[in-house]
């Protein structure tokens, strides 16, 4: 597991950090960054550098999972589109469920919003910044995968 930070505690919950550190199947590579992905028709190799030592390593790999963070950076959208209590953008069906008119814009049209449409018609949100994204099942999955 390649981690840019000096340790996991900076950005990950304690229970998950303990499970990762305690799992003998996981090699933790802190203060490191990916430097290359290689392969012909599919991923065959992953390379990284240890930022403290300068050592570059490569290993054969067929899969890569990237986690870039767990907190949305949406403060600049406050008052422009509806956000949930954690700052994730409400879209589609989720809009009528949690909109607070005093803090969040409400859906202004008579038609329902499209699946990934925010409270501002024609503005869409995709990926982890959206409320109800993969994050909802990522934590239970991590608990299942990390004994």
Image: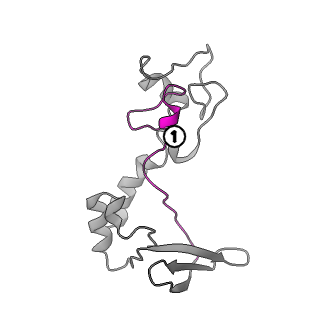
Figure colour scheme: one colour
Does the magenta segment cover residue 6? no
- 137 or 28, nearer to the observer: 28
Q: Is residue 57 left or right of residue 114?
A: left
How far from the left and from the top, in percent, is residue 47?
A: 57, 80
Q: Residue at x 31, y 63 (%)?
A: 9
Instruction: Tell me the quarter of the image containing the N terminus.
Output: bottom left
How far from the left and from the top, in percent, is residue 101?
A: 44, 17
Quadrant position of residue 15: bottom left
Q: Which residues are magenta?
A: 62-88
Q: Residues within 10 Å of mark 1 (few under 14, many from 20)?
A: many
- 128 or 44, nearer to the observer: 128
Does the magenta segment cover residue 65? yes
Q: Secondary structure at mark 1?
A: loop
Q: Is residue 66 above or below residue 61?
A: above
Residue 42 visible in the displayed image: yes
Residue marked by disc 1: 130
Q: What secondary structure do most residues of the magenta stretch adopt?
A: loop
Q: Residue at x 67, y 28 (%)?
A: 122
Q: Is residue 111 above or below residue 93?
A: above
Q: Residue at x 38, y 33 (%)?
A: 85
How far from the left and from the top, in percent, is residue 144?
A: 34, 61
Instruction: Tell me the quarter of the image containing the C terminus.
Output: bottom left
Residue 147 visible in the displayed image: no
Q: Is residue 41 above or below residue 85?
A: below
Quadrant position of residue 109: top right
Residue sitting at the far right: 40
- 114 or 83, nearer to the observer: 83
């Amino acid at each position: 597991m390649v981690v840019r930070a000096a340790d996991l505690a900076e950005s990950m919950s304690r229970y998950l950090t303990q499970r990762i550190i305690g799992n003998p199947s996981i090699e933790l590579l802190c203060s490191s960054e990916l430097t290359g992905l290689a392969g012909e028709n599919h991923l065959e190799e992953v390379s990284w550098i240890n930022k403290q030592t300068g050592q570059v390593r490569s290993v054969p790999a067929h899969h890569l999972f990237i986690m870039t963070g767990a907190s949305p950076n949406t403060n600049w959208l406050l008052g422009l589109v509806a956000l949930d209590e954690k700052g994730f953008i409400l879209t589609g069906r989720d809009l009528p469920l949690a909109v607070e008119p005093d803090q969040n814009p409400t859906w202004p049209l008579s038609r329902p919003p499209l699946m990934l449409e925010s409270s501002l018609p024609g503005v869409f949100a995709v990926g982890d910044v959206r409320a109800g994204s993969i994050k909802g099942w990522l934590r239970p999955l991590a608990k299942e995968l990390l004994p």
